[in-house]
Image: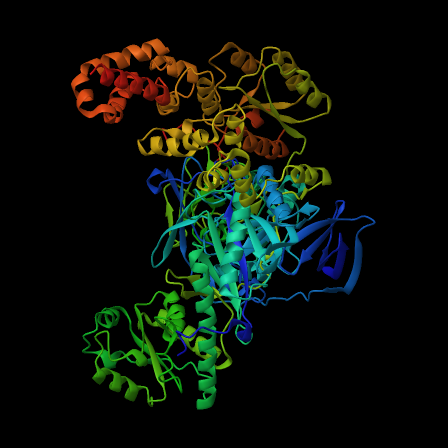
Amino acid sequence: MKGQNRLDYRQLGLKAGLEIHQQLDTKTKLFCNCPTRLRNRDESTYEVRRYLHLTESELGEIDRAALEEARRRRLFIYKGYDTTCLVENDEEPPQPLNQEALDVALEVALLLGMTPVDEVHTMRKIVIDGSNTAGFQRTALVASNGKISIPEGDIGIATLCLEEEAAQKVVEDRSSTTYSLDRLGIPLVEIATKADITTPRQARIVAEHLGMILRSTGKVKRGIGTIRQDINISIAKGARTEIKGVQTLNLIETIVEREALRQVNLLNIRDELKKRGAKQVETEIIDVSDVFAATKCKVIKNALKKGGIFAVCLPKFGGLVGQEIQPGRRFGAEFSDRARRFDIGGVFHTDELPGYGITSGEVSALKKRTHATSENCIIFVAGERFKATLSLKAVVERANMALKGMPEETRRALEDGNSAYMRPLPGPARMYPETDVLPVSIPPERLDQIKSALPELLPEQRARYIKEYGLSEEFAGLIARSKRALLFERIVALGISPTLVVRTLEGTTSELSREGVPVQHLADEHFIGVFKLINAKKIAKEGIPQVLKGLASSPSKSAEKVAAEIGLQAPSKEDIESVIDKVVQSKEGFIRERGLEATKPLMGVVMKQLRGRADGKLINSILKEKIIAIMREK
Amino acid sequence: MKVKRVNVEREGITYTGLLMPSRGACIVLKLNSGYNIGLKKDAKTKVTVLKEGVAMPHKKVSSPSPNPALPTISILSTGGTIASKVDYRTGAVTSQFDVEDILSAIPELTEIANFRGKAIYNILSENMQIKYWQKLARAAANEITKGADGIMVTHGTDTMTYTAAALSFMLKTPVPIVFVGSQRSADRPSSDNVVNAVCAAKVATSDIAEVAVVMHAGMSDDECLIHRGTRVRKMHTSRRDAFQSINAKPIGTVDYKTRKIHTSEEYRKRGEQKVAINDKLEAKCALVKFSPGAEPDVINYYTDKGYKGLVIEGTGLGHVSTEWIPAIKRAIDNGVHIVMASQCLGGRVCDRVYDTGRDLLKANVIEGEDMLPEVALVKLMWVLAQTKNSAEVRQLMQTNIAGELSERSKQA
């Protein structure tokens, strides 16, 4: 279809909103005192097996998404650690709301110009995919009504919620899902923009801007998986689609482009169906196992052993199911995504056949068997009768939606920027109060205190570092983004060269870390201790890595002690001269041959002997003097 | 619940939602998104009613038609929540006591039996009273007489084991009487209510004609334990597997997935005895816990208040300080029957090993054998309602009546 042509988003009435989920770097989890540390799966020390139940009586009113999950009764296995507790296991009431996390949430809210509520009420949001042991996620609305200004215009920020991170899915099989409990309960803020975004590019810029603000607090987790974007997208005649789990900013533009494209193409298909006079599809499931009695298709062969092949006919859908609606994704995927939720072997449609080992003979036999004409498309699934019936019902349901346009749904972002069906869009009715957590009031004094200490945003901080400290753009950016920015300022105030401080805090530490030095043991006071030695000229800057290395392995020692132990006290000028004299004398021939060019290689030799105790500049100047002296002797 | 739809204007922002009942200094509003927020009630806050409250029609669920092939269980509810309903519109949670509502909350039950039910009372289990035990025992006996093949008692977990012990002494039953509850609230999808109720129903239709407690065996939803009503104790504040048999093995287990019962201990079989009730209890009994330095006045208080029986939870093998001995003597001389149990819970009382113990025996204290202190208390209430003769009381207290004590302390 119109795959490659750029769409006119204004004309299409594109509207998008972002939901950003950012983990907070707090000491403990949102509702218990466990650390917010991720673990390796093989460190797991226990396992809990559970089912989740939704009551029949609620089905009338219950949220569509929850209902969909409930259809598939699954066993959930949770892996626990020595860093998780009974709260994660849903074996104990939660602790009070983490106040450190609430402070960070309020700080972000104020940075986004939002108005906090007077009293924070924790809610239970029903989520029964098993990712929360309780069957609900605890979440609280903290603030609303903010905005951010970007060059492309103002974007409203609807709400900021403080909530628990879900457990991480480890593995999923036919009847069970395994989750890891280390991530469950890490505090996160969910920031939802208003649907003010009108172009794919703007979506990316807004996401970048929000990410920058979050990082400016210095109190959020960093790295893969610590921030996730969900995007709500619709075009004027389409339907609201929520695309979940976008992990990289680069993908946002493509996701929005491709969803707009999908909606355009689905509307075209609807128009074509209308033109063809398509009517409501009836669910008439036909057992077509006999057609494939002698098939060469492996999936079908296997399915025949355990169940059978079952088909539905979609009148007037012929040819359309095979059409691409996103680059590399056909309309047929809309059906198979839904059908596959019921644990079946394979989903096929006649628009893609013959193929997959299915012959044209089998296709015609299938058409004959189902009395299908060329205007029809047959969708068939391989598997047990019960599951096949459920999955074909889902197919027919989707086909009937196609007659009207498209359903509102929640989709999962794929790596190429396309998306796959997850479940219907959750309705609003899925929350009730978390009665085990008392409401927290936010007195004005608390807000005032946070307001008075709001961090400067990263771009401003970077600019200030360039201006005040004469840092290069690269170094200024590096240290502004760093968790050690405050430490940087403290150390520079001692009178140390800003560039040296940045190089030490960012460069040296990561080099040491690569060597396997446990740099995570290095506290602010360690660094300050090292720079005080520099300031007092007790060690040379060349000695910094060695002292840090020593401190990292024995964090209880002082920098001075470590320096003394490795013999790093700076030698006197005389001592340096005598070391250099010896070197110069032993290499006299070399010097005579090379002249001043010998400086560099000899510098290495001298430095090695002084092992970083003396300042390089000083050594360099003495060495040069001596070399020149020898050359003059000639 | 009737709730108004309102606009709340505060600091230039208009919030729209349902006005929720609130006790504090804030207006609680349920927004359209489902979130509740609190907004200060002061002069700067303006509330406009958009729509007066309308009550939600209470949808009555009809009970499924009985399956003649299945046995009949009578559910007696006492207030413990085995089923809840959440109104997501308002966030209100209501406990369900009607059989129809319980069955619609736990539809798996209908595959096990036909149910009829009765709400005996609706209280928190910590508010349980001795007269409620008696009323429950009579109701159970009545249901059995009316032909119930098994009884399920839904009960709050806090005092469930006291009630189970009380029924164990008061009733002779030809059918299972199964106590069940939930440790994690029934309004959460992860509640243990479903697994516990399904396993309990399975036991109620089995041939285990005992008063039993059926609750989770572990943290997982794999199986439940069948505890004898006189041997079980709540050993954890919140875990699903809080209930444990002490000084005895559970009668057996129920596998949730397969619904198979596996028994490993002896039990009274269905129909071995006729239903009989002896519901007299002496309420003037108390359980006293000794701790180092505790003054003997504690005992004097009960003596002077006219108590008829005391169970003392002593230390170790069953000890109290030497200072308590005269007070205990005085109590017994005044007609108070005193039973010694141990705060160790595990193991048997033996007051013949140390001097204080021997002094207690001289004072005529009754060794409570390997009975749980709470069970000894309930038993003493029942025994003292039968006789006040101290020799008879001693004899009954030290005889196994409902599986509460054993003559041999087994290895495991």
User: Looking at this view, is A560 or B95 the one in front?
Assistant: A560
Q: Is residue A501 or residue B14 the one in the foreground?
A: A501
The residue sitting at 18% across, 20% down in the picture is A592
| Left or right: A632 in relation to B33 | left
Kindly give the residue lying farthest to the right in the view shown. Answer: B43
Residue A92 or residue B319, whichever sits in front: A92
The quadrant the C terminus of chain B occupies is top left
**Residue A541 position in % (x across, y down):** 39, 23
Residue B23 image position (x, y, % from top left): 75, 46
| Residue at 42 percent of width and 39 percent of height | B250
The percent coordinates of residue A349 (x first, y second) are 32, 78
How does the figure colour the protein chain or chains?
rainbow
Q: Nearer the viewer, residue B34 or B90?
A: B34
Taking the image as shown, residue B178 lies to the left or right of residue B60, namely left
Can residue B112 be seen here? The reply is no
* Residue visible at 51% across and 9% down in the picture: B355
Give the vertical position of B312 relative to A106 (above or below): above
Q: Is residue A348 visible?
A: yes
The image shows residue A21 at horizontal and vertical percentages of: 51, 51
Side (left or right) of A341 relative to A159: left
